[in-house]
Image (spheres, helix red, strand yellow):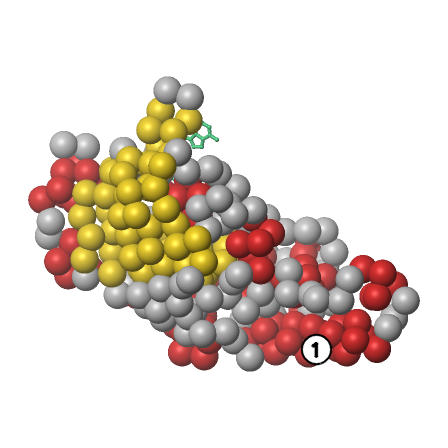
Amino acid sequence: TGRAAVPLRVRSLTVRFAGLVALDDVDLTVEPGSLHAVIGPNGAGKSTFFNVLSGVCRAATGSVVLGDHDLTRTAPHRIAALGVARTFQNVVLARGTVSDNLMLGRHVLTRAGLLASALRLPGAVREERTHRARVREVAELVGLGDLTDTPVDLLSYGDRKRVELARALCMEPRLLLLDEPVAGMNGAERRRMVDLIARVRAELAPSILLVEHDMPLVMGLADEVTVLDFGRSVATGPPGRVRGDPAVIAAYLGG
Ligand code: ADP
Ligand code: MG
């Protein structure tokens, strides 16, 4: 299981909303299997960046290329099928149980059509069985193995954040986009999420783009860090170098 990670190449990406440049000529490369963090003050354009990568927001100019695929003008469902999976800054789950939500992640990989599934043709039945098995494995991986039949409404906030990550993992991502995975978590939940991200890297090795405000977390996990400020990339490099960069200090002090 798992698909090979591929590089992400973003070139000269600009996104405009009425009267506002949310992303301004951004270049960014994520090496296969690496964890690249995107940091920056509120309003810097981090979530917009993820929205472009997942196809829900259009680039004005520039390009987004994942491996051999140009994603710049590709529809969201197609981008998802190509292996870009995300979590959201505010948890977004469907109603139903944990496994219902994880099956939604598998759905993007489904080849058998709806009619084949409805008629329970052999191919569709086999595919369904594979999906169920993978959902169980991923639920175990994220520590939700005992909660697969629990309605997500009854879960704690930390557990719901992990359901979201698990749903993304069920898509067999080549590139995983994590938007503030520990936001709003208490200390214990945070540590658990950090351990989980490390485990995902060790076992599934997708390329990861991470938006996060928690600096020690970012500095501890990331191979590369890019700093956005007012939509511009003001610094990029290994955490140790970016931390001391004058442009970064200025961005955070509002200088
Ligand atoms: P971040 O995630 O770094 O806090 P965002 O990407 O959410 O920043 O926002 C970047 C800028 O773009 C902000 O000024 C925000 O108000 C604006 N923005 C984001 N989404 C929209 C939208 N759909 N329409 C208009 N402006 C938007
Ligand atoms: Mg945001």
- Residue bearing mark 1: 130
Which residue is at a point 19% across and 61% down the rendered structure image?
A: 238
220 over 246 or under it: above or below:
below
Q: Is residue 18 above or below residue 128?
A: above
How crowded is the residue under tag 1: few (<14 C-alpha within 10 Å), some, or many (20+)?
A: few
In which quadrant of the rendered view does residue 24 lie? top left
Choose between 234 and 157: the one closer to the eye. Answer: 234
The type of residue carrying mark 1 is: Thr
Q: Nearer the viewer, residue 193 or 172?
A: 172
Q: Quadrant of ligand 1?
A: top left
Nearest to the observer: residue 243 or residue 5: 5
**Which corner quadrant holds the N terminus?**
bottom right
Q: Is mark 1 within 8 Å of ligand 2?
A: no
Where is residue 224 shown, x and y percent of the image?
25, 61
> Residue 3: x and y, percent?
50, 74
Residue that protrudes farthest toward the top in the picture? 19
Q: What residue is at 58 percent from the left and 65 percent from the top?
A: 171
Judged from the image, the secondary structure of the residue bearing numbered disc 1 is helix
The image shows residue 135 at horizontal and vertical percentages of: 65, 72
Q: Which residue: 79% across, 72% down?
A: 124
Q: Is any part of residue 96 visible from this angle?
A: yes
Depicted 160 relative to depicted 5: above or below: above
Picture quadrant of residue 192? bottom left
Name above or below for residue 211 compared with residue 250.
Answer: below
Quadrant holding the C terminus = top left
Horizontal side of residue 6 vs 80, given as left or right: left
- Residue appearing at x 29%, y 57% in the figure: 29
- Quarter residue 253 falls in: top left
Q: Position of residue 69 (x, y in %)?
A: 45, 58
On the question of residue 98 being in view, the answer is: no
